Amino acid sequence: MSFVSIPDNSHFSLRNIPFGIISTADRDPRPAVRIGDHVLDLKVFTASGGFSGLSSFKQTNVFEQSTLNKFAELGRPVHRAVREYIQEVLKANGKFSSILEENKELKSKALLSVDVVKTHLPLQIGDYTDFYAGRNHAYNCGCILRSPQNALQPNYYHIPVGYHGRASSVVISGTPIHRPYGQVLTNPKAEVKVPEFIPTRRLDYELEFAAFISKPNDLGHRIDVNSAEDYIFGYVLMNDWSARDVQAWEYVPLGPFTAKNFGTVVSPWVVLHDALVPFKAPTMERPPDVGDVLDYLKENDSKSGHDIDLEVEIRTKEGQVSVVSHSNTKFLLFSFPQMIAHHTVTGCNLQTGDLLGSGTISGESDAAFGSLLEITKGGSVDVKIGSSTRKFIEDGDVVTFRGVAKGDGEGLVGFGDVACPILPAIPYGKSNI
Amino acid sequence: MSFVSIPDNSHFSLRNIPFGIISTADRDPRPAVRIGDHVLDLKVFTASGGFSGLSSFKQTNVFEQSTLNKFAELGRPVHRAVREYIQEVLKANGKFSSILEENKELKSKALLSVDVVKTHLPLQIGDYTDFYAGRNHAYNCGCILRSPQNALQPNYYHIPVGYHGRASSVVISGTPIHRPYGQVLTNPKAEVKVPEFIPTRRLDYELEFAAFISKPNDLGHRIDVNSAEDYIFGYVLMNDWSARDVQAWEYVPLGPFTAKNFGTVVSPWVVLHDALVPFKAPTMERPPDVGDVLDYLKENDSKSGHDIDLEVEIRTKEGQVSVVSHSNTKFLLFSFPQMIAHHTVTGCNLQTGDLLGSGTISGESDAAFGSLLEITKGGSVDVKIGSSTRKFIEDGDVVTFRGVAKGDGEGLVGFGDVACPILPAIPYGKSNI
């Protein structure tokens, strides 16, 4: 269907057309879209009149930027027009074939193999907020910390629970993270509780889905849940690295802080809202005894979530590889529009480039859980990875997330890999600071 | 001492020279310093060769920006040289009198009355982190929520407890904030806990001291506690508005979120680190039974805190005015260098413009507490404001913070007013969204 050859199993079919930021040895960071195993350099494409067939699109200077923020803030109608136009341009023998397919010079300059490009953080993030909308994850954690009877807090079914995360340490797939040192209560049964300062022994991933905000709202003004989708630019997968032992000691009363501020990894290609519309699906059902949500969270759209298959692969330092989880975005109790409505209900202003994480997404069995804490029952049982075993992540391991919406023969819409290698801790001492 | 006349009680003596961002009817936002009831427009000053007497300062384009970030990232040696030079320029009959005092044309263009300028947020904030280092405040809150015996968590004396705050809603003194709507558990004793959606009934201020970060550290690299002061650009006062009823329902397990994301107000003039060096003082003493902090928090400097008098004034909508609290920055258990060392201990990267809040600073009696929650014992007793009374803040009230380091006859170093007016809630409904 496209003149660019696309492998059958590619996440980047003509239906997808995700946006990102790329650079090469001789090109500074600039916007691009991905198609199969190629990228279309939008700076070069724009400069050579690539958008001459889309006369409504006047703001082509957004593709001269080193982030997608300026493009994102143009809003849904522009994103839609630009994405659909690029799809037409990439179609074999389409009505815009003269733009690229038949223009050998531009094709050779603008269409590059993914092998020669480096990806960068797609947007400059203002604030990053992480929610806790994965009901099964919240329940599993509650069982580990408390008991099945009171695993979920009384507020859980009413509030899309969330907290402010650390924006500066959100990085792109492939960025290695050093095992963090931190305060750990190694002897929790001692009468006088004194922590030790050690590298974390319980390093864990969290499988998340996340949305980037396009247009801002003013301070003091709420976003209606039924308009909230218009504020979403697109989606990425995300690994919210967590040091469970540091978290256990620090998180009461103000929530996780240093246990999660050392690295959060996102996929490089932002899948636009429109590309996922065919895969919209209901959020999780609410149990009958908890009642309905408050009016400000009530949605007209019965399919405000998504049906996207997720998987977690671990490659151990010994070279063993296993997919340890198969999950799905449908295991979220609240939708992103509900998260946005709640985030702004007191008047908080969202800004272009803000990142909202879903919280860890766990399915309904050990083989579908989105963190090792859950799979290993709080670090008490092993998970097998080929001939290796793990309770938590070890130095030299690489955790990879994948997410893909399965098509109906028309091609896949996916996120590619979120690859997360772990390096040893930097020893504590003057010379390393 | 200065040729600019400075009222005796001014917070902005020649010892201070704080930096901010100003605009006028015909000047776009630009850097300035404050002196008495005047400001020196640094864009105009720079363009007219004002820095010709400071040949080491080549990066004068930092004063053509609309924020102080570029100036902040130049680091302490440059901040010091520039501030000391401006002090010399402003001295009566000083060695640089020809620059401004005797240059009538530049003086009339660059030296403006505060009455004709508007102030703006001094730095673009990347991330905002709020700590909880006010020991008395943490203890008082613990007593209200739990009991005096276990008011403080076991981690409190070991961790400079903090959480990620919302950066987008940090605004400048004078910005009115609408009373927020939010989820409130109005009937906490009901067996099935169902919240209501109402305007907060327990709107409260929090008296805080805050630091802006100058130079960044790389992801993965810790900042040593004994170098951490070098990463501080300067200080402001801060009001972290809080909706106590929303907070009570939402804060377990991930900390405050919508209860505090609707507005945080800072003073407009950043008092540089050097200006407060004469007022350095010890942090609070640790009780003997809790042991020492971990090595990474041990400071060589026995005066890593400050002695700055703080006050909270409430002006009611009825026109009554009282100072309800006198506190002091010395009631902090941890210093900013300790907060920075802890923040980065797992490898989190700080960036130029990041804002760190101290947490609420309460002294040792009702008349020194930094929030109404504490003064009114959780909303159970009234505080008198002239002939008015309050348990929490009402629509039309204005809360004003002031902070000043008392000099030794050489002039005051202070922060001016942080004025925080409260407007009624915006009614919930389609038309207001």
Image (cartoon, coloured by chain):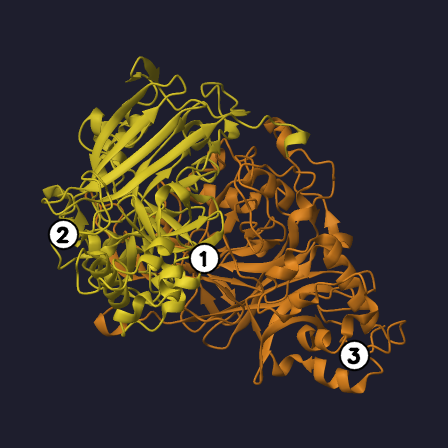
Chain colours: A orange, B yellow
Instruction: Calculate the distance from the C-alpha at mark 3 to the C-alpha at mark 1.
Output: 48 Å
- Numbered disc 1: what chain? B
Q: Amino acid at mark 3?
A: Ser
**Residue A320's spot in the image, x, y percent?**
52, 74
**In the depicted view, which residue is nearer to us: B32 or B305?**
B32
Q: Amino acid at mark 2?
A: Pro
Q: Which mark is residue B66?
A: 1
- Numbered disc 3: what chain? A
For mark 1, give the secondary structure.
Answer: loop
For mark 3, give the secondary structure.
Answer: loop
Q: Is residue B108 above or below residue A334?
A: below
Q: Which mark is residue A5?
A: 3
The answer to which image quadrant residue B401 occupies is: top left
Disc 1 + disc 2, Cβ < 8 Å:
no
Q: Nearer the viewer, mark 3 or mark 1?
A: 1
| Residue appearing at x 18%, y 59% in the figure | B295
Q: The C terminus of chain A is located in which quarter?
A: bottom left
Disc 3 + disc 1, Cβ < 8 Å:
no
Q: Is residue A103 above or below residue A306?
A: below
Q: Which mark is residue A124?
A: none
- Say whether residue B350 is visible: no
**Residue A228's spot in the image, x, y percent?**
66, 43
Q: Is residue A308 left or right of residue A383?
A: right
**What residue is shown with label 2?**
B278
Give the crowd class for mark 2: few <14, some 14-19, many >=20 residues within 10 Å: few
| Residue appearing at x 33%, y 32% in the figure | B400
- Say whether residue A21 is visible: yes
Instruction: Calculate the distance from the C-alpha at mark 3 to the C-alpha at mark 2.
Output: 69 Å
| Residue appearing at x 24%, y 64% in the figure | B98
Q: Earlier in the sequence, mark 1 or mark 2?
A: 1
Q: Is residue A428 left or right of residue B173?
A: left
